[in-house]
Amino acid sequence: MSTKPIHYPWYKKEDTDAFFALFQNNLANFVIIAAALLGMGFPASIVFGKVIPGAAAAVIVGNLYYAYSAARLAKKEGRTNVTALSYGISTPVMFIFLFGVTLPALTLTGDPELAWKIALAACFLSGLIEALVSVTGNWIRDHLPKAAMLGALAGVAITFIAAEMLFKTLEMPVVGFVVLAIILVGIVGKITLPFRIPASLFAIIIGTVLAFSLGQASTDKITEGLGNIGFYPIVPSLAAFEGFGYLFGTMIALLAVILPITIYNAIETMNNVEAMAATGDKYDVRECQAVDGAGTMIGALFGGMFPTTVYIATVGSKWMGAGRGYSILNAIVFALAAMFGLIAAMAAIIPVAVIAPILIFVGISMVSTAFQTNAPKYFPAIAIAMLPYFANYIMTRFNNAAGEAVAEVSGGIVPLGQGAMFTAIILGAITVFIIDHEFKKAMIFSVIGAGLSYIGLMHAPSMAFGAANDFAIGYLIMAGFFAIYAFRKTNTAVNSELSEKQNVA
C-alpha cells in the first residue's frame, strides 16, 4: 500500500472515448427495451415514464459507485492509471427478462401494468439472489482457471460484440467503413486525429454527418424521436412488492427462469472483474457482485426491471487509458437522458452503423486480453471455452425456431448453446486441468458438468430434474476416464516416494 499522495483526475481526455463506448452500449440496450416493450403493447407512459427512468436509476448508482471504487483503488496502490469498472444492464439477461419474464407475465395477465409489477418483483428477487451469492465470489474466482473464465468471455466478445457489430457496420458500407477506419487509426493505431478530437467522438460526428449527407439516415426518425421528449422524473415505487404476490402465486414458474439467469449474471460479473485483474486493476469480486445485486434492486424500486452487471467493455476502456471520469459522465448523461426523454431522440439521430465500430474494438480487445494474459499452453482451453457461444449466437438468432433452422447443420448446436456460460467454463476448466495433468480436478469439473446438465442449467431449455440425461451421462463417463489417470498418477507418485526411501535406506 502506498502512502504517497497522488492526483487521480476526475476526468481526462481518454475518458471521452471510453464514455462513448459505455454510453452507446447502455443506450443500445435502452432503445431495445423501449422498442420491445412498445411492440408488446406496453403504453409509452409505462415505458418512458417508469421503466426507462427506473433502469437509469440503477445505471446512475452503479456508475457513481464504481467511480468511487476506482478512486479508492488508486489511492490504495498509489497510481493514477486505474480504470473504473464499466456498469450497466446485462444484455443477455435483458433479453431473458424481456421475453422470458415480462412477455409471459403480459400474456397471462393481459394487463401491462400488472405485468410490469411482476417483472419488477422478478428483477428485485434477482438482485437479492446475486447479493447473497456474492459471499462466494472470491472463492469461486480462486478455484476456476483464468483461461476458462476469460475464454468464456472471449466467446461472448467475438460473437455478440465484435461479430454482431461488424454485421451492423456493414449495413451501411460507406459510412461503416469510414467510421471503422477512424476507430482503427485513432484507438488501435493510437494516431492523433485532427484537432486532437478523441477517436470515438470524431467517428460519431463524421459518421453521422456522412450518413445524413448520403441519405442513408432518414430525418423522419429524428422527428419521431423528438416526439418523446418531455419530463419523466426518477421517483421510487412500491410496485415491485405488489408484484411479489403474483410472482409467488400464478407466476411461480418464472422462478425457473430467474434462478439460472441470476447465477449466470453473477458469473458474468465475476468473469469481467477477473478480466480487469488481468490488465492490472484488481477489484474485489464479492463487492462487485454485491454492488450489482444492490444496483438491480435499486433499479426495481424505481421502476426498472432489468438486472445490471459489470461490463465486458471495461477492458476496452482500460486499453483506451480511461480513469473514473467516463463512469461519472455516463451517470450524469443517463440521468438527464432518462428524465427528459432524450434516449429515443439520440438513438434516432445516430445510426447504429456509426456506433457499431466502437464496440468492434471493445470485442477484439477482450479476445486479445484472453490470450495475452495466459501462457501459450492454455490457448487450447481458451479456444474450446469460446465455442459454446458460437452455438448460442446461432440459436438465439433463430429464437424458438432454432432447433428446426439448424437441424440440417447439426443437432448439437442448440444444446451446446443452452447454458453457454456454464458449458464454456466447464469445458475450459477441464482442458486447463488436463494440460496441467491435474486429472482429479478434471474429474471433479466433469461431475459438476453432469450435475448442471441433470438439473437443466446446461444443454437444456429449462430447469428440471433429468433435463439433459444424455449429457449428464456423457460427463460422468468423462469423469470416470479422468479418474483412471488420476489413480495412475497417484500410484506413480507413491511408488516414486517408496523407491526414494529404499534408495536412502
Image (spheres, helix red, strand yellow):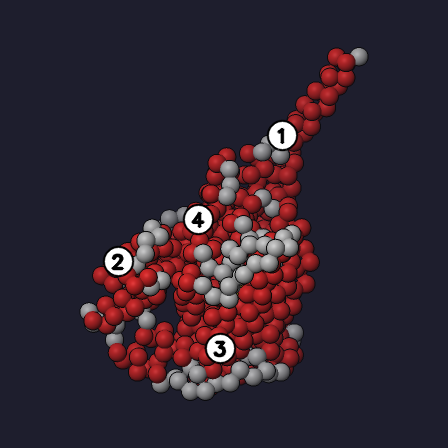
Examine the rendered structure and indicate whether residue 78 appears above or below residue 96: above
Q: Amino acid at mark 3?
A: Ala
Are discs 4 and 3 less than 8 Å apart at CB? Answer: no
Residue in view at x 28 percent, y 56 percent: 181
Q: Is residue 28 visible?
A: yes
Q: Which sits earlier in the primary sequence, circle 4 or circle 1? A: 4
Mark 4 to mark 1 CA distance (whole Å)? 32 Å
Contact between marks 1 and 2 (CB within 8 A): the answer is no
Q: Which callout, 1 or 2, points to the residue nearer the camera? A: 2
Mark 1 closeness class: few <14, some 14–19, many ≥20 residues within 10 Å:
some
Would you place residue 337 above or below residue 409 in this image? below
Callout 1: SS:
helix
Dot placed on the residue nearer the N-terminal end, 4 or 3: 3
Residue 306 in view: no
Q: How far apart in space, not on screen, are marks 1 and 3 (Cα)? A: 58 Å
Of labels 1 and 3, earlier in sequence is 3
Q: Amino acid at mark 2?
A: Phe
Residue marked by disc 4: 367
| Amino acid tagged 1 | Tyr
Amino acid at pointer 4: Val
Tell me the residue that label 1 is attached to. Answer: 485
